[in-house]
Structure formats: C-alpha cells, structure tokens
Image: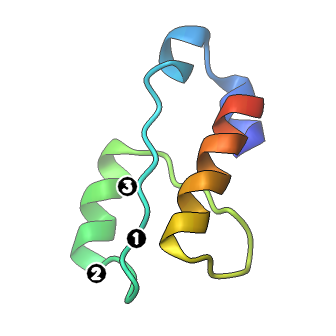
Amino acid sequence: MKDILSDMDSQHYNHSTILIGPEGNFSKDEIAVLQKNFTAVALGNTRLRTETAALVGAVLLCTA
C-alpha cells in the first residue's frame, strides 16, 4: 500500500477510497468490476476483522 501511495500525486492521494470486503470475500464478478476502477492492495496475509481492517487501512493511508 505504501508503494502505491508513494507513486500517487497529492490530488489522487486526497481522494483515496478504502473498500473492505465482506466476511466471505468479494464475489468474482465484484472483484472484476472493482479491478477496473480501483487499485488493489493487501493489508497482509492475515484476515482482519472489519473494524480492525478499517483502522489499519486508515492509519496506513495517513502515514504513507
């Protein structure tokens, strides 16, 4: 995530969106649509609870 954010200019950085998948993951169709409009990043190999993933994503976005 930090590598991608470091390549962005400040205009794109200020308009970032964090999408957190449902418990069963996004469907293949949802992933295909999302990949056309978003850059996918991972927060690591561990599955995080929704509440934790939101906090981790926000912190990484703010500290990149």
Question: For mark 3, does the 10 Å Cα neighbourhood hold few (<14), some (14 to 19), or many (20 or more) residues?
Answer: few
The residue that label 2 is drawn on is: 27
Look at 67% across and 55% down and name the residue there.
Answer: 56
Look at 25% across and 69% down and name the residue there.
Answer: 30
Question: For mark 1, does the 10 Å Cα neighbourhood hold few (<14), some (14 to 19), or many (20 or more) residues?
Answer: few
The x, y position of residue 52, in whole percent, is 61, 66
Earlier residue among tags 1 and 3 = 1
Earlier residue among tags 2 and 3 = 2
Contact? badges 2 and 3 (CB < 8 Å): no
Give the distance between the C-alpha atoms of the residues marked 1 and 3, in whole angstroms.
Answer: 13 Å
Indicate left or right for 48 with 45 as reference. left
Give the distance between the C-alpha atoms of the residues marked 1 and 2, in whole angstroms.
Answer: 10 Å
Question: For mark 2, does the 10 Å Cα neighbourhood hold few (<14), some (14 to 19), or many (20 or more) residues?
Answer: few
Q: Amino acid at mark 3?
A: Gln
Q: Amino acid at mark 1?
A: Gly
Look at 31% across and 56% down and name the residue there.
Answer: 34
Of badges 2 and 3, nearer the viewer stands 2
The x, y position of residue 49, in whole percent, is 56, 77
The residue that label 3 is drawn on is: 35
| Residue at the extreme front | 51
| Residue at the extreme bottom | 24
Q: Which mark is residue 32?
A: none
The residue that label 1 is drawn on is: 21
